[in-house]
Image (tube, grey):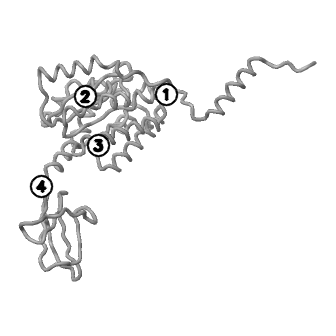
Amino acid sequence: MPFRRNPFLAILGLVMGLALACPHTNLHAQAPDPTRFESQILAYEAQDLSNPPPEQPIVFVGSSTIRMWTDLSTAFPDFPVINRGFGGSIMKDLLYYFDRLVLAYQPSLVLVYEGDNDLASGMPVEEVYQDYVQFVALMQEHLPNTDFGFFSVKPSPSRAGVLDKMQELNALLAGLAAEHDTLYIDTYTPMVDDDGNPMAKFFLSDNLHMNSAGYRLWRLITTPVLNEWEAARTATPRLTAIQWDGSQIVVTWENDGQLEAAPDPSGPWTPITPESPGRHSESPTALRRFFRLGP
């Protein structure tokens, strides 16, 4: 009996062949049009006109996890917080609206929650991470003196199928924050049980969005981070010692600050790049050498 080719197998083989020929093809859906949020962004801008936000606020921005944090100002009464969440968003949407949701406020601190919807839509972890890297680049270019931080992706029970991807992304975000000496707030670990399963007690009946217990937990996690950030931000730079160690002048200081040196108290003063945080040493090159520490 002659061999008869199965037409279904032939079509399947063609599809597999195309996939092998194009290994970098993205199989997830194309990112949605960010302008779908235009009306919500316009509403925020209208709100700013009628009720101007505080100067140099702390901007909480991101998807519905932020948008639904409706008692944000009550949760953090000692800080000038504003909520600029827009539900259903992904990181690409925040990049698109960066000028209007972040830059426009000239904030002192930006706290971001994205990645949840990104991973659930099938977006690869590396692509979401690169969107975060782009956000860091925007901050460094446009707001170099503004601090920022990331909330980890929370473990919603309804998205248990991507928990491994959430953990992978969270590890990358923690590393990104450490690389840039900025904030990372781990909300994932306290929301899973000893077996690593999401705890439903923190979520609404949809098993996706948080209930009041979830937001109370986030407040408890975030408050000490904000307190520590504020303490470091307001700490006054202070010289601790200028010493001669037998071969070099050694200058030490605390609380960051820019070290400058001059041949005379009247200047000219030249900024110095320290060899390590809070420490500078140099061989004497003149009889007179003065140091000062600025903000």
Mark-to-mark CA distance, 2 and 3: 15 Å
Mark-to-mark CA distance, 4 and 2: 32 Å
Residue identifier under label 2: 100
Mark-to-mark CA distance, 1 and 4: 47 Å
Q: Secondary structure at mark 2?
A: helix
The mark that comes first in sequence, 4 or 3, is 3
Screen quadrant of the C terminus: bottom left
Front-most of 226 and 266?
266
Mark number, residue 122? 1
Q: Residue furthest bottom?
A: 246
Discs 2, 3 touching: Cβ within 8 Å:
no
Residue identifier under label 4: 236
Left or right, residue 63 beside residue 121: left
x, y percent for residue 226: 20, 42
Graded by Cα atoms within 10 Å as few (under 14), some (14 to 19) or many (20 or more), the crowding at tag 4 reads some
Mark-to-mark CA distance, 3 and 1: 30 Å
Mark-to-mark CA distance, 2 and 1: 27 Å
Residue type indicated by callout 3: Glu
The mark that comes first in sequence, 1 or 4, is 1
